[in-house]
Image (spheres, rainbow, N blue to C red):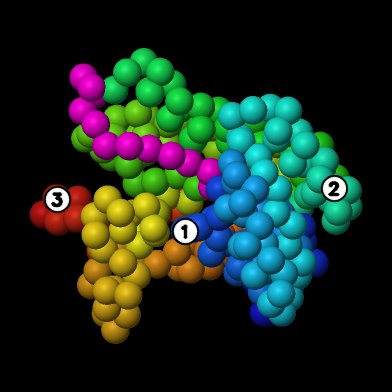
Amino acid sequence: MQERFSVAGQTAVVTGASSGIGRAVAETFAADGADVVICSREQANVDPVAEAIGAGPGGDCLGVECDVTEPPAVEALVEATVDEFGSVDTLVNNAGASFVASFDDISENGFRTILEINLAGAATCAREAAGHLADGGGTVINVSSVAGQRGAPYMSHYAAAKAGLENLTRSLAVEWAGRDVRVNCLAPGYVATPGVERQMGVSADEIDRETVDRQIGESREIADLARFLASDAASYVTGETLVAQGVPPAEELPS
């Protein structure tokens, strides 16, 4: 039974994996026996992560420099994966970016850039990996955010991109079901990533692990959900967005 929850033997591509959730997903998959290809926009950022993962028990890890907004770079990422490991079984679209600003202060270029990274980049990766994912069945896991469901003041560009990503998930799930490709989405709430620590001053070390009464989680908790969605245990799950936000904000609770 436990084997159904395993990703051992898979080859997974994880974008935006130099830190935070992406790195935790890559570490979790590799520790479970999957070969992992990780990417970031700068090779210097991804190399030490790939080396550390590859030195541990489990699957191998390859680090590739890739800007997901550049289709030729994404094509090269997929080619490198197939050349090294022979297939692509799971694609985790985790690459993302944002900044805090009021809508009035976001330039058109700034708005488009965030949409390109968070939404168009995921679509490009899915497009390039599609043929390999369909070769024997595969999974796509898009990492969204609760901001895509309830909005995010002063991050309207990010919230719009993530809302689009969730709808892309549902659309592809229907279109690709006949190819034996499942497409799902994760929507984390606040997670103690390096980015959140810089913006909010909250680190993973400050989270009380003894209680579920909390509104911030750890990257490894999201990684566990990604592993589930990529495993046979989730074989009846597609087109869904799995929310992980701890205790919901009080205004969202039923009265």
Crowding near the residue tagged with mark 1, few <14, some 14–19, many ≥20 C-alpha atoms within 10 Å? many
Left or right of 121 on screen, residue 159: left
Residue tagged 1: 20
Identify which residue is drawn at 65% across, 40% down.
66
Say whether disc 2 or disc 3 marks the residue closer to the N-terminus: 2
For the N terminus, the quadrant is bottom right
Residue 82 numbered tag: 2
Left or right placement of residue 216 versus residue 102 in this view = right
User: Element at badge 2?
Assistant: helix
What is the x, y in percent for residue 81?
A: 80, 49
Which stretch appears magenta?
91-105
- Choose mark 2 or mark 3, whichever is in front: 2
Residue 252, image x, y percentages: 19, 50
Against 34, is 189 above or below? above
Q: Earlier in the sequence, mark 1 or mark 2?
A: 1
Identified by mark 3, the residue type is Glu
Up the image or down, 42 lies above or below 245; here it is: above
Give the mark count: 3
Q: Residue 10: horizontal and vertical position, in percent?
A: 77, 61
Q: At 61% across and 51% down in the image, what residue appears? A: 44
